[in-house]
Amino acid sequence: MSGLFGRLYRGDTHYDFMANKNLYFAIAAALVTVSLASVIFRQFDLSIDFTGGTILEAPNASGADLAEYRNAVAAVGQGSARIQLTGDDQDGVTLATEALGNEEQDALIAALAEAAGVDGNDVAVDAVGPTFGAEITRRAIQALAVFLGVVAIFITLRYEWKMAATTLAAMIHDLVVTAGIYSIVGFEVTPATVIAVLTILGYSLYDGVVVFDKIDENVRALGAKHTFTYITNVSMNEVLMRSIITALTTMIPIGSLLFVGSFLLGATTLQDFALALFVGVGAGTFSSLFLATPLLAVWREREPEWQRMQRRADRRLGDEPVPAILAPTPFPVPPAEEPRPERVAVAAKGLNDTSPGTRPDVVARPPRQRRKRR
């Protein structure tokens, strides 16, 4: 196995993730900004469980389709009602609308019974108050607060509080992005959506802990010689393939449920649950690798210990001039001595010339005779 996938499989990649950390931060900020803007201005399409209203259920004896039911209820002024065919053979129909008065409810029951081909007594009516949705929201917020608190305590005790803080930041990012996508797409928010949101937090936590555990391991192995940025890059390259495989194996079945089941086959019962899972898993994979980890590296690099390590690394690479206190002044070297005229003359005339007026500094001597070996 060769090429990019082979290197990914062996963990033999050397991509410099930290060099593009500002790009990752910009992408995360853009996603959060767009999501918050959509939540504020477009808001959510809340289900009847949160807003309160009336639910009508009847057998689909006539085999009518959604268009026929919409025309029937629109004729009595309830064109905004949500209609869904239920059952494997679409042998049932469910209609949800806002709270109605007695006359409006009777007219809607008659229209639905006529379109379904049943008697009005076969239509089941269920009134849902808004207190049910408020109770779901309250319990979801309580569960979220407890979950985030337990996560913060666990990561702080197992690793450090800075890892806990960046993990919580990544989870908040995932929540905001998932909520924003829901608002943009316009899917109905149901109790199943709340369950899915709490589920993706567990996935995001798992993916982030995998990266942080590898960083913690490499800090103990490489911390004495390398900077925290270098250790972060090594760790991210080592867990990259694992994160990709985990994300793909999770998103493929969820995508099948969402796109094939909901859009192609029309099984929309779980589309709200599937959308939250699909978006949440994708956002969690991005945030654990490209948000929480770079944030931790930037934070840790500000610590005095890692700043000293960074300065030593810069000096080794020659990116920073060596301070004068660390560079001892060499002993002074005397300048080269100019050759004397008489030496030049002697050299030109010959080393063995001993005529008067000359003072050869070097006297030629005959070589010694070698001693004979016995």
Image (spheres, helix red, strand yellow):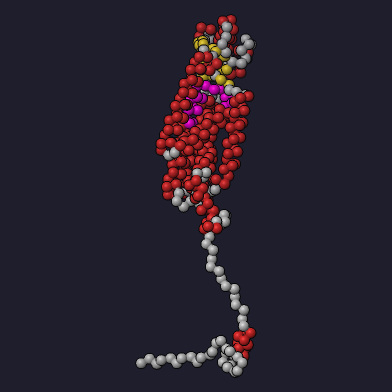
Q: Residue at x 60, y 85 (%)?
A: 343
Q: Quadrant of the C terminus?
A: bottom left
User: Which stretch did the figure color magenta?
Assistant: 182-201
Instruction: Give 262 or 171, whichever is nearer the viewer.
Output: 171
Q: Residue at x 57, y 24 (%)?
A: 187
Q: Residue at x 38, y 91 (%)?
A: 373
> Is 154 left, or right, of 40 in this rendering?
left
Q: Residue furthest front?
A: 357
Q: Position of residue 186 (x, y in %)?
A: 59, 25
Say if residue 168 shows up in the picture: yes
Q: Is residue 127 magenta?
A: no
Q: Residue furthest left?
A: 374
Q: Examine the rendered structure and indicate whether residue 231 appears above or below residue 152.
A: below
What is the total number of numbered labels drawn onto the structure image? 0
Q: Position of residue 284 (x, y in %)?
A: 51, 35
Instruction: Give 208 or 149, whichever is nearer the viewer.
Output: 149
Q: Examine the rendered structure and indicate whether residue 232 appears above or below residue 86.
A: below
Q: Residue at x 53, y 51 (%)?
A: 311
Q: Examine the rendered structure and indicate whether residue 96 appears above or below residue 31.
A: above
State the predominant SS element of the stretch in magenta. helix
Q: Position of residue 160 (x, y in %)?
A: 44, 38
Q: Residue furthest bottom?
A: 355
Q: Position of residue 36 (x, y in %)?
A: 59, 28
The quadrant holding residue 319 is: bottom right
Instruction: Give 114 or 324, whichever is nearer the viewer.
Output: 324
Q: Examine the rendered structure and indicate whether residue 362 appears above or below residue 86.
A: below
Q: Is residue 189 magenta?
A: yes
Instruction: Give 371 or 274, whichever is nearer the viewer.
Output: 371
Say if residue 61 shows up in the picture: no
